[in-house]
Amino acid sequence: MTDKETAILTIAKQAEAAGGRAYLVGGCVRDKLMGKLPKDHDIEVHGIAPDALLEILKGIGEPLSFGESFGIYSLKGLDLDIAMPRREHAIGRGHRDFEVEVDPFIGTEKAAMRRDFTINALMEDILTGEIIDHFGGRQDLQEGIIRHVNDVSFKEDPLRVFRGAQFAARFGFKVSPDTVEICKGMATSELSSERVEGELQKAMLGSDTPSVFFEVLREMDQLEPWFREMKALIGIEQDPVFHPEGDVWNHTMEVLDRGAKLRDEADEPYAFLLLCLTHDLGKITTTTFEKGRIHAYGHESEGLPIAETFMNRLVGSKAVKEYVLGMIPSHMKPNMVAYSHSKVKNTNKMFDEVSSPKDLILFSVADRPVMAGDFKFQGDRDFLEGRLKIYQNTMSEPYVMGRDLIESGLDPGEDFKEILDYAHKLRLAGIPKAEALKQVLSYAKKLRTNKR
Ligand code: ATP
Ligand code: MG
């Protein structure tokens, strides 16, 4: 038995000895029934006073209390939360505006009522292994349904809208029609961005089909306000020759799901999937009809401010935002250079412009051009990976640096950056250092004589 299992069993035995009962609750019971390994465990102890519970926990380890008045403890180092049964009532509109009423004697049904979905309201008696299922959670688990527990209390926490979408995406479940209905009327604007992003991350990183998260929100009419840029993609038409899948929304959802299959290979999985989600936002403002064809000229750069607004609303990490905004303008390039078998100089430049060349290639696979008619280019990952190797080799060669120029007698001046940019161009063109140094010096000389 692991330390954690021993602790769980000890709590249960001592709670029983004190006249109470301990249950596993929430996600861990659900995960076990789904045949998955739960990552953390929650215990609810009924029928004994909070003081008595604290005494039991002190005998086992080092209880950490986060809000003793809420009757919630954890045991240091064990990924184990222990709580007293409680009722919760909303007293404000924020996620934290809840009145919590701890009551060891409310019984399992009332205690389970505060949970969001039936599959999350299951309990397991630790000593007998009996599953306590007041709301049909086991059947919903079998049928693959996300269903809210209680009409009245469900509405009190708007985060549940995103939790429902996220669980549907991760488990491949359907949201019950009455749950969709109730979610339609919930106001999500006052949630904190951290909480909403937390649910988005679970969908992006924990689902094989993150598109389900967005499709569910669309069905719930809950893309606004947090995902209003995605909503704007609905109905933006694309050239059917290049995009038989339909509008930009459909395309984005497909790219997202293909991206999820490549996620584990990516340098930055979450940022990579945000790139999949936002890469075509520029089509919102650039799509035009000309001579019977649909174009979106310049969408790769026009999308930047839109993606930035979206991420400023939702994404906490500056590094993630920078990654995405750095990649969007280049998102079309890999498939273009692969189609035309561009020169090494060009592929080097393309890779040099982004923070993760590897992820840019993965993106091009996810964004794979599916073309109808005789035009059947499907992307060329081998070509791109070959070129990435060349780029990496090129960058590992010695190259002209500022100090080489100074050592050669060039005074640093205002134009030094321009001169170094030129050196960088030669580096990307694969010119060996000795030759490049000559060329840079002669460039600098010309530059300085012309300016005089
Ligand atoms: P996972 O951790 O795999 O995402 P989980 O079900 O364990 O899923 P947690 O957020 O860890 O989810 O919450 C644990 C349990 O607490 C849930 O199963 C649910 O019963 C309850 N819970 C958590 N957040 C809420 C909420 N906003 N509203 C109602 N119940 C909640
Ligand atoms: Mg959990």
Image (cartoon, rainbow, N blue to C red):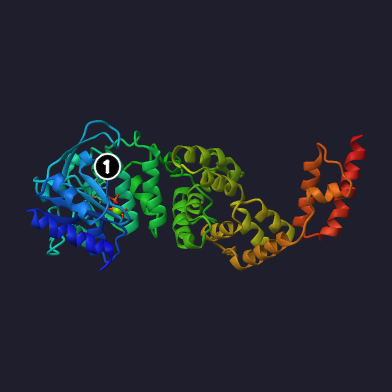
Q: Quadrant of residue 160?
A: top left
Relative placement, left or right, of 440 versus 35 is right
Residue 309 percent across, percent down from the top left: 50, 37
Relative placement, left or right, of 299 versus 104 is right
Residue 440 percent across, percent down from the top left: 85, 50
Q: Quadrant of residue 340?
A: bottom right
Q: Nearer the viewer, residue 167 or 364?
A: 167
Which residue is painted at 26% across and 37% down in the image? Answer: 185
Residue 414 percent across, percent down from the top left: 81, 36
Q: Nearer the viewer, residue 450 or 370?
A: 450
Work out which quarter of the rendered image holds the N terminus and state it.
bottom left
Q: Quadrant of residue 129?
A: bottom left
Q: Residue furthest left?
A: 19
For the question of whether residue 237 can be seen, the reply is yes
For the question of whether residue 291 can be seen, the reply is no
Instruction: Indicate whether 307 appears above or below 43.
Output: above
Relative placement, left or right, of 24 versus 369 is left
Query: Label 1, on which residue?
Result: 183
Label 1: how many residues lie within 10 Å, few (<14), some (14-19) or many (20+)? many
Relative placement, left or right, of 238 versus 112 is right
Number of marks present in the image shown: 1
* Dot 1 amino acid type: Cys
Q: Nearer the viewer, residue 5 or 354?
A: 5
Work out which quarter of the rendered image holds the C terminus and state it.
top right
